[in-house]
Amino acid sequence: MSVMSQMGFGDKWIFWIIGCLSSSRASVLINDHSTTKELPITRGIHQGDPLSPFLFIIAMEGLNVAMRLACQNSIFHGVKVPNSDLDISHLFYADDALFVRQWASSNFANLARILRCFHATLGLKVNFHKSMVYGIDVSDLEVGCAQIFGCEVASLLFKYLGVPVGANMRLKRNWQPIIERVQNRLSSWKAKNLSFGGRLTLVKSVLGNGEFAYRFPLLFELDKKKSCLASDRCNPHNMDWAWKKLPSSPLEFSELESLKEIIESYSFFVGSDS
């Protein structure tokens, strides 16, 4: 309640959130047939609840403020970006938290204190068994200092969200696993025995029906028809475009090639529905 109040939420909104938490119920499915009686959720909300990511953002705002104050008072020292005034100390993405700091024992100790205060205030505790410390250009002895947290000491290279971190991403071979996964996914789609209407539905489900302007902004500027959707332009039976002028710049050609690749990857054909 205190965090939401400090963030400027009104009393009615805060009571709504409290009501959602206090009235939450869950049941257990047994052998895919019967369920138990509804049980009250006594600690937060159940896994997969759509309210979970929003509450996480609100809760982590408390830690965000604590980290900013620690940096302002020189209790914690982040990493300064070269040729910039930007000082990075922490990054939050979805339900992940990344702390970036200068390699000093005082930084480790103070971060541990900040996390303990955060736990005491909001009841959220970091699971150090699922946390790892990565040292960049530091000795093994210095990395050993990270064991103050009781978490695992790891080294580069590792993967985050399927993308290799620590590799030279300017090399084509480091992108090859990602490219192969995308190609395998496309191959499975093309192998589906779908009629033209079914394949067009598949395109729409992948591309969505977002406005063409957001998908291909440069082509949108050249297109006289401004009300079209991205999926309309991927319909091989509707390629009658009216251009203000033909694509000429490298970026315009790049967008056009991307659009052509999408159209060609689905191998549309004319035939009767089975």
Image (cartoon, rainbow, N blue to C red):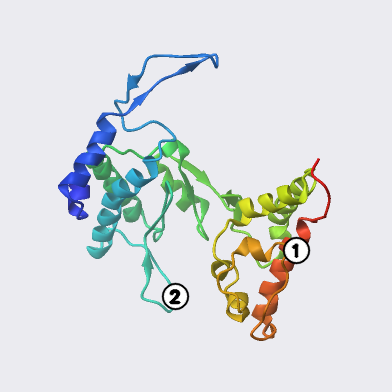
Q: Position of residue 167 (x, y in %)?
A: 63, 59
- Residue 254 in picture, x, y percent from top left: 69, 75
The numbered mark at residue 82 is: 2
- Callout 1: few (<14), some (14-19), or many (20+) C-alpha neighbours within 10 Å? few
Q: What x and y, as percent, mark residue 24?
A: 31, 29
- Image quarter hosting the C terminus: top right
Residue lying at the far left of the rendered structure: 11
Left or right relative to 123: residue 135:
right
Between disc 2 and disc 1, the foreground one is 1
Relative to 90, say whether 259 is above or below.
Answer: below
Q: Which picture quadrant has residue 243?
A: bottom right
**Which residue type does callout 2 highlight?**
Pro
Q: Element at badge 1?
A: loop
Q: Residue at x 17, y 50 (%)?
A: 10
Q: Is 191 left, or right, of 10 in this rendering?
A: right
Circle 2 Cα neighbour tier, 10 Å, few/some/many (<14 / 14–19 / ≥20): few
For the point 21% across and 52% down, which residue is it?
9
Judge from the rendering whether residue 30 lies leftward or rightward of residue 40; answer left or right. Answer: right
Residue found 58% across the figure and 56% down from its top = 208
Q: Which amino acid, mark 1?
A: His
Rendered location of residue 8, percent (x, y): 19, 55
Residue displayed at 33% across by 38% down? 125
Please identify the quadrant where the N terminus is shown.
top left
Task: From the viewer's side, name the closer residue of 209 and 14.
Answer: 209
- Judged from this view, the residue extending furthest toward the front is 272
In 3D space, how far apart are the residues under numbered discs 2 and 1 (Cα atoms)?
A: 52 Å
Considering only order in the chain, which callout, 1 or 2, is on the residue closer to the N terminus?
2
- Which label sits on residue 173? none
Q: Which residue is mark 1?
A: 237
Res. 158 in view: yes
Looking at this view, is 5 or 83 the one in front?
Answer: 5
